[in-house]
Amino acid sequence: MPEALLETNLAGWPAPKRGKVRDVYPVGDDRLLIVTTDRISAFDCVLASGIPGKGRVLTQMSLFWFELLRDLVPNHLISADVRDVPGLSPADQARLEGRIMYAHKCAMIDVECVARGYLVGSGWKDYRQTQAICGIPLPAGLLDGSRLPEPIFTPATKAVTGHDENVSYEHVVANVGVELADRLKTLTLAIYARAAAYAESRGIILADTKFEFGFVGDQLTLADEVLTPDSSRFWPRDTWQPGGPQLSFDKQYVRNYLETLDWNKQYPAPRLPADVAERTGEKYREAYRILTGLTL
């Protein structure tokens, strides 16, 4: 198995801002170089080992969706070609091929824009307690994995550390105003509808997903990763059965392994055995292949 790229330090560049998965470098005042590493997080901890090639899958999948959605919403991408990034050494160009976005710097909106078409995850947890998600009432009798009567917008706060917290639509209105809140809700559900219909045509259920938006000048812009196994739940349509956990194309395989350990879900996080890392990488690549018809 090839070695995972866990962090970058580019020759002649300042140290990046490191997120859970991405290393972000400023390029001048208004552009960014976003490098998707092979780091993987679970239970809000970055694990001690990565998934080789995962960063390339996430980047290439985002690029695929950006193209599919380009008539619906502008995005932050300038180029995904390492040769277009000024000041990148030949060695770093070779190392980062396929895993970068050279992008406009956005004034980000402090809201996670989540669309849900199925009841799962924190939505299922909220439903069991209140029969609602983010204040949206739902019918009685739904199960873990049930399809919702219609997709819903369930925003969340963006946490620097720890879990994002589901909030009501009214909370978003109070923070960004009525007009922008309505635009975020409408656009989130429109993107979800298109992506879910496309995924369905490929035999995959898009259970839920989250988007991030910002402004480039006065233009509302889709940013960050889009419709990847890290930001979305993808399920095989032919195995979907409400009433419990679903087979998935995301990092659930890693979560399931970690649940077998005597680990308190705090740092330091454990390493993954080679077979778990390999199997997880296969699930990411399988999702990319099925959705795009391409291989990496």
Image (spheres, rainbow, N blue to C red):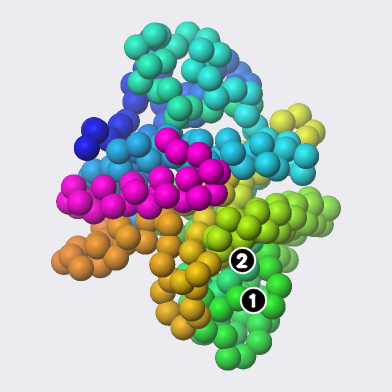
Quadrant location of the C terminus in the rendered image: top left
Q: Quadrant of the N terminus?
A: top left
Q: Secondary structure at mark 1?
A: strand
Front residue of 185 and 62: 62
- In the rendered structure, are the residues bearing label 1 and label 2 in contact, judged by CB atoms less than 8 Å apart? yes
Whether the magenta-drawn stretch holds residue 98 is answered as no
Residue highlighted by disc 1: 148
> Would you say residue 271 sits in the magenta stretch?
yes
Residue annotated with mark 2: 116
Residue found 44% across the figure and 11% down from its top: 88
Distance between the alpha carbons at the discs numbered 1 and 2: 8 Å
Secondary structure under tag 2 reads strand
Q: Residues within 10 Å of mark 1 (few under 14, many from 20)?
A: some
Magenta region, main secondary structure = helix
Mark 1 or mark 2: whose residue is earlier in sequence: 2
Splitting the image into 4 quarters, where does residue 196 fall?
bottom right
Give the percent coordinates (x, y) of residue 222: 67, 41
Numbered circles on residues, count? 2
Above-or-below relation of 82 to 76: above
What residue is drawn where x is 72% and y is 66%?
170
> What is the crowding at mark 2: few (fewer than 14 residues within 10 Å), some, or many (at least 20)?
many
Name the residue type under label 1.
Leu
Amino acid type at circle 2 is Arg
Q: Is residue 10 left or right of residue 165?
A: left
Kindly give the residue lying farthest to the bottom in the view shown.
Answer: 141
Magenta span: 269-296
Image position of 157 (left or right of 12): right
